[in-house]
Image (cartoon, rainbow, N blue to C red):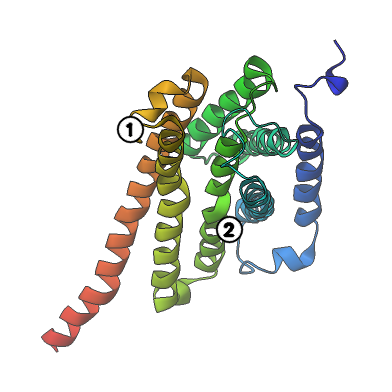
Amino acid sequence: MDLLNSPHIPPSLIGALTVYPLLFGTLGRMPAIRAILPPKADTQKQYHLCNKIVASVHSTIMTISGLYLLLSVDWTKNDISTYKTAMTPFLVGLELGYLTQDTAFEFYQRAQFGVGSNLILFHHVAVILGSVYYLYALTLTNPGPYFIGMLSLMNMSTPILHFRWVLQSRGRTFVNSKLKRFIDTALMVTYFWCRIFGNWWMGVAIGAKLGMSWYEAPMHIGKKFTITTTTMFFMNVVWWLILAKQWVKSVKGFYFSKHSAKKSE
C-alpha cells in the first residue's frame, strides 16, 4: 500500500508533522522569542513558550478553517453528516499531525525536565485515537463536515490560554492585576462557548435534521459520532470546571481579600 497516495493520509497530516516541528525548532533559536520571558526563565520554560506559540498558530488555522467550512456550506440543502468536502480531511489531518507532535513534546518534557500533565496527555491520546479512527476506520465516504467544523472551533480558546501563560510568566505584576481577571473571564467564557455550548449545539442541529430533541439525536447518528462527541463533551466539561474553580479563587482573592483588608484598616 502506498501510504503517501492513500485517501486516508491527507496532505495536511504530512504537512503538520513536518512544519510544526520545524516551526518549534526555529522559534527556539530566535533571540526575540527568548526575550519574551524574563532573563531568569529556565530552559524548560523557553521550550514551553515555543510549544505554546506553535499551539496558538495551529489553533488559529483550525478556527479560521472551521469557520470557513461551516459558513461556506448551505446546511439546509446539504446533509450535515454525509456532505463531501476537501476541507474535512484537511482539518482532521492537521489536528492529528499537531497532536502527534505535541504529544511527542509532552513525553520529551517528562524525560528531559521531569514535568508534565497527565490530563493533557490523556486528552491528546484520546483525540489522536479518535482522529486515526476517523481517517482509517470511517474512511472518507462519510466525512461529517458539520461535526468536524464544529469540533475545529474548540481551538478558539487556546490562544487566550497561552497568552495568559506568557503574561503570568513575566511576573507578579500581571498576576495581581485586573487584566488577569479580565483574561481569566474571557478564557472561561470562550472555552464554555466553543467547547461545551458547541457540543450541545451539534445535538440541536442533528435533532432539527432528524425531527427530535437534542438529547435524543446523538443516539441516532451512529457510534462513530456518538462516541467522539460524548467523550469530547465530558472531557471539556472537566477542563472547564477546573478553569471555573481557578477563576472563582482568583476573583475572590483579588477583590474580596482587598475589600476585607480595607475594612480592617
Between discs 2 and 1, the one toward the N terminus = 2
Residue 130 lies in quadrant: top right
| View extreme (front): residue | 77
| View extreme (bottom): residue | 265
* Amino acid type, mark 2: Pro
Mark 2–mark 1 Cα distance, whole angstroms, equals 31 Å
The mark closer to the camera, 2 or 1, is 1
Work out whether 189 lies above or below 85: below
* Amino acid type, mark 1: Tyr
For mark 2, what is the residue? 159
Residue 157: where, in percent of width, then height? 52, 55
Q: Relative to 146, is 254 on the left or the right?
A: left
Residue 193: where, in percent of width, then height? 43, 53
| View extreme (top): residue | 1
For mark 1, what is the residue? 215
Work out whether 14 lies above or below 177: above
